Image (tube, rainbow, N blue to C red):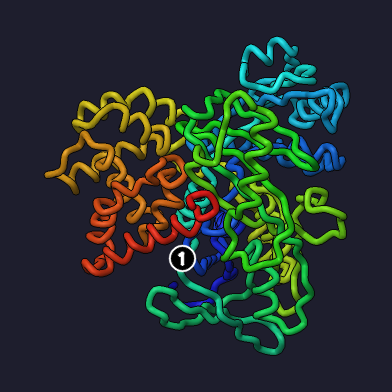
Amino acid sequence: MSEGTFDLAIIGGGITGAGVARDAASRGMRVALIEGDDFASGTSSRSSKLIHGGIRYLENLEFGLVFEALSERQRLFEMAPHLVHPLRFLLPVYKTGRVPAWKMGLGMWAYDALSLFEAPELHTFLSREELGHEFPELQTKQLEGGFAYYDAYMDDDRLVLETLRSARSFGAEIANYVKAVGVNLEDGTITALECEDQMDKSKFRIQARHVISSVGPWTDKLGQDLFMDWKKMLRPSKGVHLTFKRERFPLKDAVVMGAESRIVFAIPRHEMVIVGTTDTDYPGDPAQVRTEEEDVRYLLKVIESYFPGVGIRREDIIGTYAGIRPLIHDGSSSESKTSREHAIWTDPRGCTFVAGGKYTTYRNMAEQTVNHALLSFPIEDRARFNHSDTVQPLNPKVTSELLKRAKNEHADWARKFGVPSSFTGLLADRHGLEAKEILGDAVDEFSNTSRKSEEWMWCAEALHAVKHTMCLHLRDFYFRRTPLVLSREDHGMPFAKAIALVMATELGWTPSQTLDEINALQNKITWEFAAFSS
């Protein structure tokens, strides 16, 4: 971090912190952001990976939340077309279901209306026969029919990284593996953050006029660490997902499965299908959350009840992840009824906290957070920093038009760089025109390496990740820059040595450090997947 006083010091490098940094920096504020681990290492990489209005929130009459989310969904289609993609959802309706067909139909019309009829396609009703034709493996007993509607899927971790890159382009200073360990108070007001670099354990201070906490499920812990009189604010809820090979669970569209008091999605994503989520109170340490045996049993039971003909078993699971929703404690009787609305409040000592909310509404939530923090600033600063500029594309190289161009040109890149068109097509989908730069850098860097192997492509991605996304550990690349761990039965481990060597060259690792990185990755995978790998 550079010297001098920042206008804002942000703690937390998930989607909320990234959004706050981008919003504030776009206003011309001097911004510093620190993250104690890797960016998006908490809740922000462990979502259902959906950008959606939240059709189930209509049951709780949260119309404002749904309207806000659907409006932001439309913006994100334009802001990040390489990360946010339309996806068709099918919602079967059964005679024994919690919500009758007529009521579900009203909900669908409300969903379309709250989107101002700007969904990729409006909802349609499917008869029992039509639904059975589209999904022959679907449970037909008591089936009345169903509805088709559109929302979107996204790459949650990469959305964080692109938002942070955009914040840096506005001038924000950003660091991962830097932990806030205390505050400096003068006359009862925070004037600086006391920080510790987690890589070399050095300590330093960030001078700031105001601090913003966006640490999600760690909000109460941070509040307790900083302030003796902290009052508990959160009701943390655990959400678990399982992943399967798509050839084993052959879905072409997402399916909404009603289970007990909540919804479980089955979401096709390229070569895999994600199934989740659970919703249970979690009083433990967010850093220790992982999938447990009861989570696996619950989700397998839901799949079996909707798709008995597929015969999904425990042995078919190839990946899993668990995360914590930082829900605001509102006195609700159950986790699923606790509101997904966010809350923003400022401590008199000069720290604004933001928690709760939905991934989809992060941009709007960030804007509200900065506006709230500015109330602590002199009136002339409020006027100077009044306007944000956050609806433009996150990456100027990946607008909707440039993404189309990249998809049209990728075959030419394959010929130019001597790599398979399947590689260039995948990179074009993930990075737009920036894929051409990624290929060019890799060709220059790995001049003596075969460009026909899949390993080469992931090494190219690793080179880009280190140079442009502050990727400092092998596990960070596997878990938060690529789908390797979740989408492959081997979790990408056959490529680990080659990828580690690329990162070692860029980051200056010794042979011993490189081996430690490979072992740490394997240990992380083993720990995360313990519930179904035994």
Q: Position of residue 15 (x, y in %)?
A: 58, 54
Q: Residue at x 73, y 62 (%)?
A: 372
Task: Indicate the position of residue 405 as horizontal and vertical percent values.
Answer: 39, 26
Q: Position of residue 472 (x, y in %)?
A: 37, 62
**Outermost residue to the front:** 534
Res. 144 visible in picture: yes
Q: Indicate the quadrant containing the N terminus: top left, top right, bottom left or bottom right.
A: bottom left
The residue type indicated by label 1 comes to Asn
Residue plotted at (55% across, 76% down):
180
Residue ID at (55%, 37%)? 313
- Secondary element type, mark 1: strand
The mark tally for this picture is: 1
Q: How many neighbours does mark 1 have within 10 angstroms: few (below 14), some (14-19), or many (20 or more)? A: many
Residue 122 is left or right of residue 492, and the answer is right
- Residue bearing mark 1: 176
Q: Closest to the observer: 462 or 532?
A: 532
Q: Position of residue 176 (x, y in %)?
A: 46, 65
Residue furthest top in the image: 129
Question: Is residue 371 visible in the rendered structure shown here?
Answer: no
**Looking at this view, is 441 or 210 the one in front?**
441
Rendered view: 87 above or below 260 = above
